[in-house]
Amino acid sequence: MELTKNIFFNTDKLVANSTVKISYTGKLFQNQAEKVFIHYGFGFNWENLGDIEMEKTELGFQAEITLDNSDSLSFCFNDGNGNWDNNDNQNYTFAIEELPTSLILQEETGLDAHPRLRRTYIWSKKIRLAIYKIITYLPKLISGNYKRKISNDE
């Protein structure tokens, strides 16, 4: 996902407590810098500062950052020689979203959890058996090759 020119993330949204890969193809990469560092912080006050040397690839420089519970991620880039890409003194700032609780699976506990699983398992077995019988015996019925067992009493 491209959020601004020359900066890409490996995800659609920045979500709290997750890891995101940042790819950079900005002016430092275009000027063929040998090394690029990402200087980052969280929130309005740039808390939990960090600096990471980015890995140089054919597609740009890349680094992984673990996001915290803050509301935003801010960062800028430098090449270690005093050259900076800080979005014309604005820095690059992106919102961090909280993980929606509707996506978190809640484990069922208690006595009713196992009977529900058992009921589902039994129904899946019944459905499989019915499909097996249809596949096996329906063609025989249609072709007339199905012979009914005759008891010895008749």
Image (cartoon, rainbow, N blue to C red):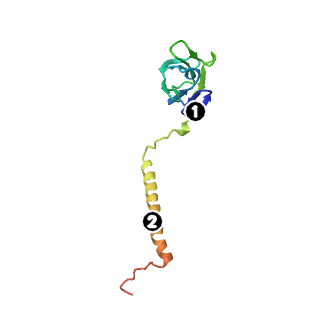
Q: How crowded is mark 1: few (under 14 residues within 10 Å), some or many (20 or more)?
A: some
Give the image location of residue 66, x and y in percent: 49, 27
**Residue 2 lies in what quarter of the image?**
top right
Q: In this view, does 135 lie above or below 87?
A: below
Task: Using the rendered view, name the quadrant where residue 7 is placed.
Answer: top right
Q: Residue at x 45, y 65 (%)?
A: 132
Quadrant (top left/top right/bottom left/bottom right) for the C terminus: bottom left
Q: Which of marks 2 and 1 is nearer the N terminus?
A: 1
Closest to the observer, 3 or 120: 3
Instruction: Give the secondary structure at mark 2.
Output: helix
98 w.r.t. 151: above or below:
above
> Can residue 64 be seen here?
no
Q: Residues within 10 Å of mark 2 (few under 14, many from 20)?
A: few
| Residue at image mark 2 | 132
Q: Is residue 111 above or below residue 100?
A: below
Q: Residue furthest top?
A: 82
Tell me the tag on residue 13: 1
Residue 110 or residue 139, whichever sits in front: 139
Q: What residue type is labelled 2?
A: Tyr
- Which amino acid type corresponds to the residue marked 1 in the rendered image? Lys
Left or right: residue 30 compared with residue 110: right
Residue 88 pos. (x, y %) = 64, 17
Whether residue 137 is situated above or below residue 107 in the rendered picture: below
Quadrant where the N terminus lies?
Answer: top right
Q: What element carries label 1?
A: loop
Question: Number of marks in the image?
Answer: 2
